[in-house]
Image (cartoon, rainbow, N blue to C red):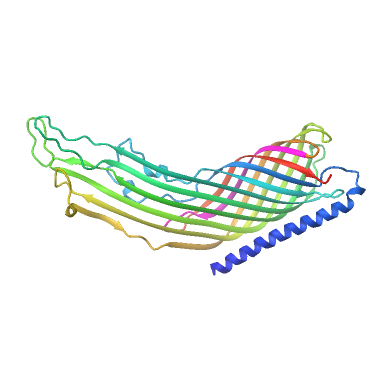
Amino acid sequence: MSELIQTRSQQSIRWLLLSTVSALALLAVAQSQTAKAEEDDSPTVWIELGGQAERVSESQQLFAPPFVLQTPRPPAEIVSPLNFERAPRYSKGGETKITVAPHGSDWVASVSLRYGRSNNDKHVHQQSYPEQWDPGHYLYVVNPFAAKFSDIVAHNTEQHLILDFQVGKDVGLGMWGKSTINFGVKFAQFTSKSNITLRSDPDWHFVYKYPTFVDWKVPGGQAYHSYAGHFSASRSFHGIGPSLSWNGSTPVAGSKDETELTFDWGVNAAVLFGRQKTKTHHQTTALYHQASGFYTPTVAQRTVVYQHPATPDHARSRSLVVPNIGGFAGVSFRYVNAKISLGYRADFFFGAMDGGIDARKTYDRNFYGPFATISIGLGG
């Protein structure tokens, strides 16, 4: 069933790309045939390239095995490993857009592609070094054979791709500039992967089993825990559906025949029909090393507190509808055949990702941050 759905999704993407190329080709042919008869010498084709740095919303449940919440807590200088487990908060990427606006027509067609990715690799080892037991009255000391520590190795990656094909009509804003209402088709693809390994000993300590006298005491052994956990996950969403947007541009200074400064804005909405997939795997182990010797514990002194063997993979797949809204605001420096734009953009995809571990738990996939683009006009 999943292969059939994936095949249909690939067919939808091919259909979208084919439609885009066909529409742009038809518009280009139409404008080339009428360009000589038009007095307007403004560009009919705009090619836009740019980049963005975006904040990415948290979209997965943290792996928190029982020993992370174990009491007694680690010393104050050891921070919880959950703080280092989080997915990347920022992504960077690029975008491209082709717009065709034939002379003598209020209609425009465009296709845009936005891609971003982020990743982080962390290895954080925190350790509190215990002091040796040295009574000062004898010729021997007892050295600790363990230490309070926390060790985490975390690797997280995230990628997103958004493809938008739209046809719009210039509806104008009178003295306030111009605006275009667009309708079309949007495709979105989100993927993320995680691989996390945790190890910890939060509570090493001397155990004093013998009576005390002369204001000092004798240790009867050393006790500590050995905790270990591993987690891996792969998550994705693919969806396609109708989109609607309203974009506008208001002159601020200058003249469109030479150099012009404009304020640009836009809002967009879409409904994506797609499939959400998640596959997770994890296991944890806890051993207690009893305090029955000064120096080293034997295997017999290690008690299994709990052991969760490798779980069967939790594989989930679900069809769903994802609403999408977004918008942007910025400024552009326009020339006759070129444009430089700077702005801030936000895009929200509600309930797109299944970020749960053992059970489904939906999270939004949101992107927001600054962007910059350069556009070149052709065919004036």
Q: Is residue 148 above or below residue 34?
A: above
Which residue is at the far right?
A: 37
Residue visible at 75% across and 40% down in the picture: 249
71 horizontally vs 42: left or right = left
Residue visible at 89% across and 51% down in the picture: 34
Residue visible at 67% across and 62% down in the picture: 14
108 horizontally vs 330: left or right = right
- Numbered-mark total: 0
Confirm whether residue 73 shows in the render: no
Which residue is at the far front?
A: 139
Residue visible at 42% across and 49% down in the picture: 62
Q: Position of residue 334 (x, y in %)?
A: 76, 36
Residue 125: name its quadrant. top left
Q: Is residue 6 above or below residue 235?
A: below
User: Magenta stretch?
Assistant: 338-359
Is residue 294 magenta-colored?
no
Q: Quadrant of the N terminus?
A: bottom right
Q: Position of residue 50 (x, y in %)?
A: 66, 42
Confirm whether residue 101 shows in the render: yes
48 horizontally vs 115: left or right = right
- Main secondary structure found in the magenta portion: strand
Q: Nearer the viewer, residue 221 or 143?
A: 143
Q: Position of residue 145 (x, y in %)?
A: 21, 42
Is residue 343 magenta-colored?
yes
Q: Nearer the viewer, residue 237 or 147?
A: 147
Residue 142: name its quadrant. top left
Q: Position of residue 49 (x, y in %)?
A: 69, 44
Q: Quadrant of the C terminus?
A: top right
